[in-house]
Amino acid sequence: MKTTVIALALALLLMPNLLLAQSRTSPAARESVRTETRQDNPAQVCLDLMNEARTNPKAFSDKHLKALTTPAARECYAQMQSMAALPAMTVSDVLLAAATEHAEDLKATNTTGHVGSDGSQFWERIERHGEWSGNVGENVSYGLGDPLAVVIQLLVDEGVPTRGHRENILNPEHKVVGICFETHPQWSKVCVQVFATSAQ
């Protein structure tokens, strides 16, 4: 049964943070790996970071949010310090196709938001590529190309009273996700994330 639709997007800018990654090689080589990974597969890095936030929220918030001082950031930190761990999300080809479709449309039309240039809503775009059930949601981030900065931006959710972006990432009903990074004429970068309980 299709039950819940959550749709939120707002262009919020946070100061980008450096993505920390482990490597068996030297510090210089680790930095090269970090840079190459961000450039070659930012969607995978973004997924890994969101799953880190879900599966170990206390450690993630200690590492990435503790030093932030805005009210929204402090609220997010407190929430993640007290919440239970959630299962990791996996990639859905159906959701990836929907995210890619919308990211490419936003790029081509130099627009923002959830409504496609053809008037489509995000759940309708999912249905072009497959079927979904349970909860679905979509996050859209603008202006940030670094996956960690995107994840922190959406978790903190500054300026969004409902904290809907944070809810999408930390929703225990969201089991699968599709993520696409694209260039954007106005905002330089756009990241579209589409979530669901199930999609196939």
Image (cartoon, rainbow, N blue to C red):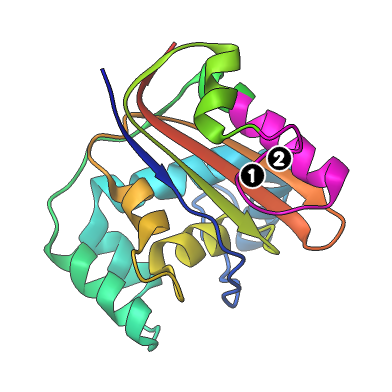
Residue at 70% in and 52% down: 190
Looking at the image, which is closer to me, 46 or 96?
A: 96
Locate residue 86, reporting x and y percent: 21, 42
Residue at 54% in and 56% down: 9
Pointer 1 residue: 42
Locate residue 142, reporting x and y percent: 67, 60
How many angstroms separate mark 2 from mark 1 (CA)?
A: 14 Å
> Of the residues under marks 2 and 1, which one precedes in the sequence?
1
Labels 2 & 1 near each other (Cβ < 8 A): no
Q: Amino acid at mark 1?
A: Pro
User: Visible in this render: residue 19?
Assistant: no
Question: Disc 2 vs disc 1: which is toward the camera?
Answer: 2
Residue at 43% in and 69% down: 160
Q: Quadrant of residue 198?
A: top left
In the image, taking residue 78 as reference, residue 68 lies left or right, namely right
User: Which residue range is magenta in the image?
Assistant: 98-119
Residue 103 numbered mark, or none: 2
Locate residue 65, reporting x and y percent: 36, 74
Q: Quadrant of the N terminus?
A: top left
Locate residue 46, reporting x and y percent: 53, 46
Residue 159 falls inside the magenta stretch: no
User: Visible in this render: residue 52?
Assistant: yes
